[in-house]
Image: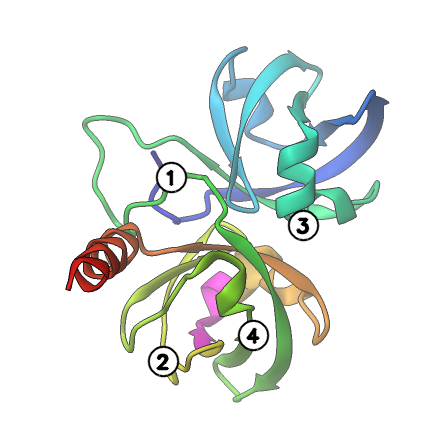
Amino acid sequence: MFTGIVETTGTVAAIAEGGTNLTFTIASLLASELTIDQSVSHNGVCLTVTSVADGQYAVTAVDETLQKTNLGKLQIGSRVNLERCMPANGRFDGHIVQGHVDQTGVCTHVQDMDGSWLYDFKYNPDEADNVTVEKGSICINGVSLTVFNSEADSFRVTIIPYTYEHTTFRDLRAGDTVNLEFDIVGKYIKKMFGAYQSKG
């Protein structure tokens, strides 16, 4: 489990094909602290470390993951947001993040507000029956954020300077695809409400 509080970024150093899978070699300051079999969130996607050496580590994304996230769009040199799984004795600074991306969305607008940045996103609500709520939580490329201007197929978030400088949000442009993990509590409530309506 994760919190959506990004620890650092990494850079894709190599990409290797293996059937329908892709293995990414990531260069990061975290590499020296990682161990094989450890779970790490990459742009919000939970992947398992398979090797560690010389300031780099490797993870493999299967076809299902590549089809449902933006990892298949990564290239050598791309930056990714990284977060290790939450320690059992740690503070819960973000929100409950599983590292299981629900669907992708698209950044539609970026606005520099001279001290903060506004980002607008659209997603297909029919694709996975997901919803946002005003002042609720959303995880975008592994970053835990608060939603406002919540609509049926769109929402907006504000980024503070620290987040802008220490995550891949500074690389994000209108038209870019992002990974979205919707609030787990909201997903359960919507599912329960849908089951109740179907019985009525």
Residue 66 position, x and y percent, is: 69, 39
- Give the mark nearest the N terminus, 4 or 2: 4
Of 61 and 167, nearer the camera is 61
**Is-magenta flag for residue 161?**
yes
Whole-angstrom CA distance, mark 3 to mark 2, is: 23 Å
Q: Which residue is mark 2?
A: 148
Q: Residues within 10 Å of mark 3 (few under 14, many from 20)?
A: many
Residue occupied by mark 1: 98
Q: Looking at the picture, tell me which residue is in the foreground, 192 or 14.
A: 192
Amino acid type, mark 2: Phe
Separation of disc 1 and disc 3 at Cα? Answer: 17 Å
Q: Earlier in the sequence, mark 3 or mark 2?
A: 3
| Three-letter amino acid code of the residue under disc 4 | Lys
Foreground residue among 79 and 195: 195
Q: Residue at x 38, y 80 (%)?
A: 150
Q: Earlier in the sequence, mark 4 or mark 1?
A: 1
Q: Amino acid at mark 3?
A: Asn
Q: Amino acid at mark 1?
A: Gln
Question: Circle 4 sits in a helix, a strand or a loop, which is it?
Answer: strand
Q: Earlier in the sequence, mark 1 or mark 3?
A: 3
Q: Which residues are magenta?
A: 156-163
Kindly state the secondary structure of the residue where label 1 is placed: loop
Residue 15 x/y as whole percent: 82, 30
Asked whether 68 falls inside the magenta stretch, the response is no
The disc placed on residue 70 is 3
